[in-house]
Amino acid sequence: MLVRMERRRLLGILSVLMAFASISTDLYLPAMPAMGRDLHASPGTVAFTVSGYLIGFSIGQLIWGPVGDRYGRRVPIAAGLGLFVCGSVGCALASNIDSMIAWRLLQALGACASVVLARAMVRDLYEGHRAAQMLSTLLTVMAIAPLLGPLIGGQILLFAGWRAIFWMLVGIGVVTGFALFTIPETLPAARRNAEPLTVAFASYAALLRDRTLLGYACAGGFFYGGIFAYVAGTPFAYITFYHVPAQAYGLLFGLGSLGIMGANFWNARVVRRAGSDQLLRSGAAGAALAALVLALDARTGLAGLWGLVVPLFVFVGASGFIVANAVVGALGVYPGRVGTVSAFVGAIQYGSGMTGSALVGAFANGTPWPLGCVVALCGIGTFLGALLVPSRARHAPEEALTS
């Protein structure tokens, strides 16, 4: 049993590891217009720095998950942090938008190890509703990253320029690497999967046939598509279209983080009583409704800037009921292959996120409409995915993966 101080340290480090996806993007969001000017790139092209990151993040998880099941959690995470640091250095030195996108891809290939295996570490230590509570707690803590990230990034941009943001990410990666080895390995050798990695990779095809798992994965996946459409689209909708100052953008972006923190806190309190699947469906319904309201305003401009900010606050805040419950539900389907399932779910989530951000960039027309349209489609998909989860999901036996 971990003593209280060790638990707090573990909680803090796991929160940082899980926050690498948002840290790597949220810090430089206010700098995207400035990056576009310096690198002579259009807003739509700059949005592909988010999409390129998500491509690497999605693909990399499929590798790191089985590796973590076979070799433990800490060493693969450390290797991933090394790649993250190298990619961040490349971003800081990039001289054109194509090299920036390529370095962002490498950065993501490393960062995803932290996220996918941190989720697996939670499942190594906790089960059932307790796992959902702990994951909600971690998500509440890590929500500080998107709350503070754009604010800090905006100040760095003001005083040191956008390249300094990526040098800061280099420092974060190095410090996290040292902190990683102050916590214990959560997957002892006796519980590791001894099968060859080729067998683990082949098991992804079997996972695609599990309706329950697909329901959880699609609910989270479509939602991430909307989230990263929001990440890629709001800098231009707020700063360029509505002329919000870059330093003030972080305040509007941070509102969503407050919603995430509040919803995760509430989810952790009621999940044992209400059930994680019911909370997932309720959150998905709320997200879909907010997304439709957003699309209406983005098309008509009836409520102006606040017609975007308010429904986006509700949509993003629904993360507190969707993400933790979808992830824990999926990880409970095959408890003997937590790393592999975490990678599978994460790849779908961030692959969908890549699609959402890419669509916003591809259809950018100088108005908020592409943002509103993509988020609305993703909100509807989130709700339909949640409906795929049976009311009382019966999990397939472990042998189904190898059949």
Image (cartoon, rainbow, N blue to C red):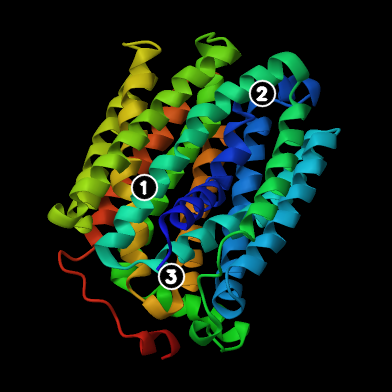
Query: In the rendered image, which quarter contains the N terminus?
Result: bottom left
The kind of residue on which mark 2 rests is: Ala
- Asked if 137 appears above or below 305 in the picture, the reply is below
Residue at position x 30%, y 54% in the image: 133
Residue 172 rendering spot, x and y as whole percentages: 68, 42
Q: What residue is shown with label 1?
A: 137
Q: What residue is shown with label 3?
A: 124
- In the displayed structure, does residue 60 sit left or right of residue 329? right
The kind of residue on which mark 1 rests is: Thr
> Number of labelled discs?
3
Q: Which of the two labelled residues, at mark 2 and mark 3, occupies the earlier sequence position?
A: 2
Q: What residue is shown with label 2?
A: 31
| Tag 2 and tag 3, C-beta contact below 8 Å | no
Residue 111 rendering spot, x and y as whole percentages: 63, 52
C-alpha span from label 1 to label 3: 16 Å
- In the displayed structure, does residue 283 sit left or right of residue 188? left
Looking at the image, can residue 11 be seen? Answer: yes
